[in-house]
Image: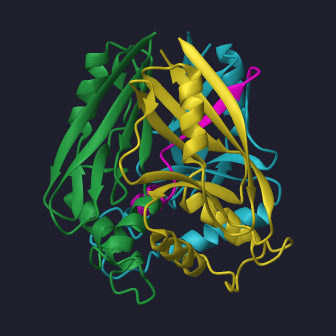
Chain colours: A cyan, B yellow, C green
Amino acid sequence: MRTHSETLQIRTKGKGTYEITDQVAAAAVKSGVETGTATVFVQHTSASLVIFENADRAARVDLEEYFERLVSEDTDYFTHTCEGPDDSTSHIRTVLTRSSEVIPISDGRLQLGAWQGIFLFEHRRSPHLRRVIVTVLGV
Amino acid sequence: MRTHSETLQIRTKGKGTYEITDQVAAAAVKSGVETGTATVFVQHTSASLVIFENADRAARVDLEEYFERLVSEDTDYFTHTCEGPDDSTSHIRTVLTRSSEVIPISDGRLQLGAWQGIFLFEHRRSPHLRRVIVTVLGV
Amino acid sequence: MRTHSETLQIRTKGKGTYEITDQVAAAAVKSGVETGTATVFVQHTSASLVIFENADRAARVDLEEYFERLVSEDTDYFTHTCEGPDDSTSHIRTVLTRSSEVIPISDGRLQLGAWQGIFLFEHRRSPHLRRVIVTVLGV
């Protein structure tokens, strides 16, 4: 059995989606695993993961706008706002997307579909340095 | 360590939930794994996975109706609509459900609860042939 | 390769979030795995998992209140209500959060971020005994 673990450091410039497909694919190759899985995990509660359409930028604009409305910063009953109006909203947006995502590996490479990209979804207004752990298991 | 990977081809007839529990359970058995995990992964950005109540069909009707409203095709600010009104909505409904799901295996079989079924959730109006990869790892 | 599987029994007192971080971390240690993953899986369709801020209780109050509104028990078109107004809502809240979550292990311990806790999210009004399977794979 082969295992490989590495931590990606992703610099964000505030709210939005940041593609990390290439870094995850590189970790899969580096592992030497032919058949197995790559687990992607975000070590934060105000940033998350999505696997999303990566061809047309407009799709991501719609996604980001949708989340602004689904979990609005104007929500009047939120009480956990000590770090600002993007405090509870960031945590809830994380819950509605993903903290971990597991992608199959075969023939030594990540088996994403033609239009799938892996994105870090930053929910905070201010820039952050985010830690994403990639763990590859297989043979 | 044992690994097993196979690709299911699921034919959909438009929007709705399609049960794939038996196919995933069969892949688990075929792997010969006694203790481990089965990772289910959809290679698309407009179809997703849910683990859902599989006894009463009415529960799935409610789920499907709920998503029609939560991410409405009538949303006026969506711009990624080149493939129709089910374009951005399909991607966002995928994000709100799952691209990957990991189910434990012990005693050589999938450890689903009594009422849990695995479903492909098709978000497109038109029929599609969907690819779902099942990767089993364990001993 | 090392594998470890155990079933946690979590007693809930009705709707809300119940932290299970310590039990999952203990399973990771017990496995003896240095590098790998811990898969957490809920065997139910009316309780789910979230990885959430575990420092300020107010964040969880906001989360719980948010879900009461996002999938309201007053929804008039729900038909799967044989077990009460928390029937379809429980299933849909499960779909919008997680049935499985995969957390990396390195240096022999669970790699959660500083503010991350693992919570069982009970969506039923009445008390339940919930089964959560933890499966550890690695070396």
Q: Is residue B84 above or below residue C134?
A: below
- Magenta segment includes A107: yes
**Highlighted magenta segment, given as a residue range:** A90-108
Residue shown at 62% from the left, 72% from the top? A65
Residue shown at 58% from the left, 34% from the top? B26
Quadrant occupied by the N terminus of chain A: top right
Image spot of residue A116 (x, y percent): 74, 48
**Res. A7 in view:** no
Quadrant occupied by the C terminus of chain A: top right
Q: Nearer the viewer, residue C31 or C126?
A: C126
Image spot of residue A54 (x, y percent): 77, 52
Q: Is residue A108 above or below residue A98?
A: above
Q: Residue furthest right?
A: B82
- Magenta segment includes B93: no
Q: Nearer the viewer, residue A96 or C95?
A: C95
Residue shown at 53% from the left, 77% from the top? A69
Left or right, residue A44 beside residue A20 = left
Left or right, residue C120 beside residue B55 = left
Image spot of residue B124 (x, y percent): 74, 68
Residue shown at 50% from the left, 71% from the top? B63
Left or right, residue A21 beside residue C62 = right
Image spot of residue B19 (x, y percent): 58, 54
**Res. B82 in view:** yes
Q: How many marks?
A: 0
